[in-house]
Image (cartoon, helix red, strand yellow):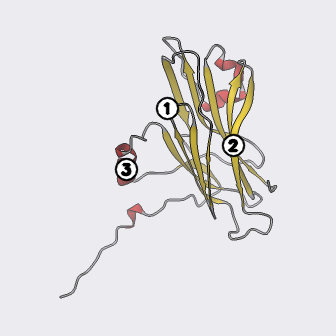
Amino acid sequence: MTLVACSDKSDSLKLLTKEGIMPYELSESEKYILQSFGMEGNSQIISFHAPEDAITLNVNVYRLEGGKNWNSSSGGAISIGTDREPMEQLTGTFTMQLKENYSIDFNINTSGRASYKTDEIILDTEIMTSTRSFLEEFQKIEINKEIPVALMVYDSGSSMRNYSLQDYFTPSEFDGMDLVQVVTLTFTDKEF
């Protein structure tokens, strides 16, 4: 008796082959797993393929202070170094999950894996409305330039307008909001 096994290649990793970043394309089974864990609306997977000059990926998490200035609240980085070992080019995935206490867990998967977690945020007001924006389409990478990939806005009011990731560059857009956080990725040509 002979058994023949068929392999379905549709669930293999779908990493970027051209330079840039974009949301990772989830298969139906991967979507189901996120739904099963209750992570569908509060998590994202981003695939990246850095330019040849890039050797380090920096992740920054900012919190808007006083409605005017971004204050770095956390972050992390991973580098392949100038000798580019064990890989020639910085490629892989970046994942993040938003938590109920306004903290964020994130992982960088490339030639190694780096995991980081931001601190919980305690607010003195009850949040009634919120909005989240995630990177939705392919974006070209410019060396040493921040790319906003997630924006979270929370407020105690009863209504809120829509915000886009590009609003990160004009912080005054968030005037009056109780809590604003943003996650950015920066690909650099320097070691950390």
Q: Residue at x 63, y 63 (%)?
A: 112
Q: Residue 34: image x %, image y %? A: 40, 46
Q: Residue 60: image x %, image y %? A: 69, 41
Q: Earlier in the sequence, mark 3 or mark 1?
A: 3
Q: Residue 154: image x %, image y %? A: 55, 22
Circle on res. 33: 3
Please name the residue that numbered disc 2 is placed on: 75
Q: Residue 108: image x %, image y %? A: 61, 53
Circle on res. 100: 1
Amino acid found under the numbered disc labelled 1: Glu
Asked if residue 66 lies left or right of residue 100, the reply is right
Q: Residue at x 74, y 47 (%)?
A: 142
**Whole-Å distance between the Cαs marked 3 and 1?**
20 Å
Q: Earlier in the sequence, mark 2 or mark 1?
A: 2
- Between circles 3 and 2, the one closer to the viewer is 2
Amino acid found under the numbered disc labelled 2: Gly
Amino acid found under the numbered disc labelled 3: Ile
Residue sitting at the far top? 158
Provide the secondary structure element on which disc 2 rests.
strand
